[in-house]
Image: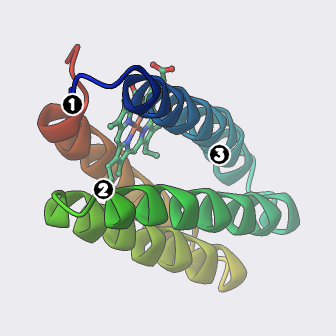
Amino acid sequence: MFTGRKDSVRIAASEEIGASRVLLAILLAAAVSASNIAQQDGEAAGAEAQTLDRLFGEVEQYFAQRGDAPDGVEMSRKSRALIAAVAASVTAKDFDAAATTASELNRNCKSCHRLYKKDE
Ligand code: HEC
């Protein structure tokens, strides 16, 4: 939001950069997760799921603090629920279910980008 004060513009810019860095880390972790699910490496996928849950916790906090993005909060929570479901499937060695839920997670990424990511 532009309020005409230089410092508030700077704060808004640094928040944007912060969100990008968090999400880029999510992408990298998600890519590792997907390859671990493909390789059926339960232990590594579980660790990635924990990292993803923490990162989406930060994304959720970012949207909650914005105060004008309830869908962003909701989709962050949905991401965390899907990540937990992937981890549970991997623990149960149900890798088909894990892969299906991972695809749903991926669709959820795109839904949020359509709403909140400016260049998509
Ligand atoms: C709750 C909403 C939301 C969800 C869910 C979400 N993203 Fe994003 N993502 C964003 C927003 C908003 C941006 C733009 C951030 C910015 O420009 O500051 C973004 C940007 C990105 C970027 C670009 C980073 C950059 O520096 O431009 C990548 C890569 C990305 N997301 C990957 C993912 C992946 C992978 C998932 C799913 C595992 C995901 N995101 C889920 C909201 C979301």
For residue 26, above or below residue 52? above
Residue nearest the viewer, comparing 22 with 87: 22
Q: Is residue 67 depicted above or below 11 in this figure?
A: below
Q: Quadrant of the C terminus?
A: top left
Amino acid type shown at disc 3: Ala
Residue that label 3 marks: 38
Q: Which of 85/94 is in front? A: 85
Q: CA distance from mark 2 to mark 3?
A: 36 Å
How far apart in space, not on screen, are marks 1 and 3 (Cα)?
A: 48 Å
Image disc number at residue 102: none
Give x and y (percent) for residue 23: 53, 37
- Pick the residue in front: 69 or 46: 69
Q: Which quadrant would the N terminus be assigned to in this image? A: top left
The residue that label 2 is drawn on is 66
Rendering quadrant holding ligand 1: top left
**Element under label 3?**
helix
N-term mark: 1 or 3: 1
Q: Amino acid at mark 2?
A: Arg
Q: How is the image coloured?
A: rainbow
Please report the residue visible at 13 percent of the width from the left and 39 percent of the height from the top: 115
Residue visible at 46% across and 65% down in the picture:
61
- Provide the residue designation for mark 1: 3
Foreground mark, 2 or 3, reads 2
Closer mark to the observer between disc 1 and disc 2 = 1
Q: For ligand 1, tell me if the residue under mark 2 lies within 8 Å.
A: no
Measuring from the top left, give residue 81's x and y in whole percent: 42, 78
Q: Secondary structure at mark 2?
A: helix
